[in-house]
Amino acid sequence: MKRIVQLICFISVSIVVFLNLKNPYLIDKECRLQGISWQHWFGTDYLGRDLFSRVIYGCFYSLSIALLVLIGIVLISLLLGGSAGLIGGFIDLVITIVADIMISIPSMILALVFAGLFSNSIFTVMAALIISGSGKYIRYIRNLVLNIKTEEFVLLAPLRGSFTFHTLFYHILPNLVAELMSLFTTDLGKILISISGLSFLGIGIQPPTPELGTILFDGKAYFFVAPWVFIFPGILLSGIVLLTQRISKKINQKWGVVYD
């Protein structure tokens, strides 16, 4: 019954939010820097754009990019980390060294380098975050594979005609879902902050695209005149990060995952 009530509340709130969304790019200078009202729930920005709509669109935009980055990190890490743990030897040594190099490079610095060498776009930011974030996952997945490959169902897999990558994806990976989900939800908020932080610095997503970082950048100049322009996107960003940490903790408690 509790689940049904929660589902009904979620659907109701989603419908109300959807019905109140406006064009996030629509400029109305006569309504610039207006406060909170029934027409504009979060007020308006310096161009008269509806801030509520821009923040909601920004949340979806930021989360979509963060999810794409994490999916890229997981795919690369499964391939490299799984190969290192399963094959071992020289391949394990090389991949481990590469992972250590990736871990040692801060994502912010790598994004700045990529933006200078290539183009200042979201794709360069995504590439930088994937490269810098893969090192930790490669190490983690390698250790998980090393622990699980001594189990009988993995040792006997070659007798059933299963080798290397088939064993990795069909026998080992299904047993790592809980650990990967815990790490995935934990890092989703971190990746989101990185994307918004880079956008705030003018790297990656550029105005007028409604993204939480760009909205914060637009609002910082009006903090003392119209603080809602800066406060609401900040609250949403913080709320999403806290929610991902909460979900990660729930996963850890449910499946007994231990990850620091």
Image (cartoon, helix red, strand yellow):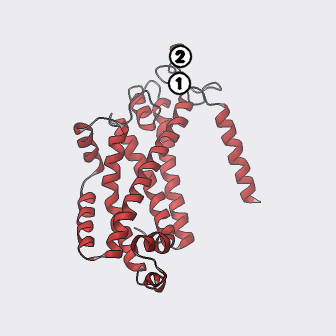
Q: At x 50% / y 67%, what residue is drawn?
A: 177
- Dividing the image into 4 quarters, which one contains the C terminus? bottom left
Residue that label 1 marks: 44
Name which of mark 1 and mark 2 comes first in the sequence.
Answer: 2
Front: mark 1 or 2: 2
Where residue 188 appears, as percent x and y from the top left, is: 45, 53
> Residue at horizontal 52%, vertical 41%?
60
Label 1 neighbourhood size at 10 Å, few (<14), some (14-19), many (20+)? many
C-alpha distance separating marks 1 and 2: 9 Å
Q: How many numbered discs, if any? A: 2
Count residues near mark 2 (Cα–Cα under 10 Å), then give few for <14, some for 14-19, many for 20+: some
Which residue is at the front of the view, 83 or 50? Answer: 83
Mark identifier at residue 206: none
Q: Position of residue 162 (x, y in %)?
A: 45, 77
Above or below for 226 versus 82: above
Q: Which residue is mark 2?
A: 28
The residue under label 2 is which amino acid type? Asp
Secondary element at tag 1:
loop
Against 216, is 109 above or below?
Answer: below
Pointers 1 and 2 in contact (CB under 8 A)?
A: yes
